[in-house]
Amino acid sequence: MTVTAVHKDLDACTLTVSAEFDHPVERVWQLWADPRQLERWWGPPMWPATFTAHSLAVGEMCRYHMTGPDGEQSHGWWRVRTVDAPVLLEVEDGFAGPDGEPNPAMPTTGMQVTLAPRAGGGTSVAIVSTLASADDLVRMAEMGMEEGLKLAMGQMDAILAE
């Protein structure tokens, strides 16, 4: 089923992507908790991710890079803010330089991932990305954030089916 809705709210400076899966919450949680599964879907298909650091403990940093079709790399990081496995993950999400350190010239996103059991089975997932301003949200949208997240999440079903 994957992505069921996308909602951009310029007043609240948020982008919300909702999805549904035919798997229990605990299984869907593993798509974030296991870095080898995470790197198979975090990033659009043509920009696969490699996590070089991954710990879902409050205060920890996760570091990754995505590699484009011509070998170019885009680096990123998460700073873990809240973990209530298997139903809630909150992180700061940002761009990094090649050294993995945060790039202060780029916007930072607050990302909240909520997983909930669906009536009749399966899991509903909501990812709410919050930016500091509407201008930052527009800038990230112009960089492909919405489409990239939809494409990335579109890869989850195949991993869950294994």
Image: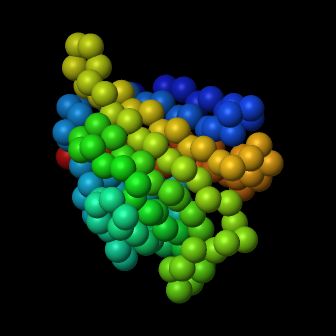
Numbered marks: total: 0
Q: Is residue 127 above or below residue 52?
A: above
Please identify the quadrant where the N terminus is shown.
Answer: top left
Q: Position of residue 66 (x, y in %)?
A: 51, 69
The residue most toward the right is 135
Q: Quadrant of residue 103?
A: bottom right
69 and 3: which one is in front? 3
The residue most toward the top is 120
Q: Is residue 104 above or below residue 2?
A: below
Q: Residue drawn at (19%, 39%), measured in percent from left and top?
A: 26
Q: Position of residue 161 (x, y in %)?
A: 23, 41
143 sits to left or right of 162: right
125 and 90: which one is in front? 90
The residue most toward the bottom is 99
152 and 93: which one is in front? 93
130 and 141: which one is in front? 130
Q: Is residue 17 above or below residue 35?
A: above
Q: What kind of colouring is applied to the model shown?
A: rainbow
Q: Residue drawn at (24%, 49%), measured in percent from left and top?
A: 30
Q: Is residue 8 above or below residue 32?
A: above
**Any part of residue 138 in sight:** no
Q: Residue drawn at (24%, 41%), measured in percent from left and top?
A: 86
148 sits to left or right of 154: right
Q: Residue drawn at (44%, 63%), measured in percent from left and top?
A: 79
Q: Position of residue 20 (x, y in %)?
A: 38, 28
**Any part of residue 60 in sight:** yes
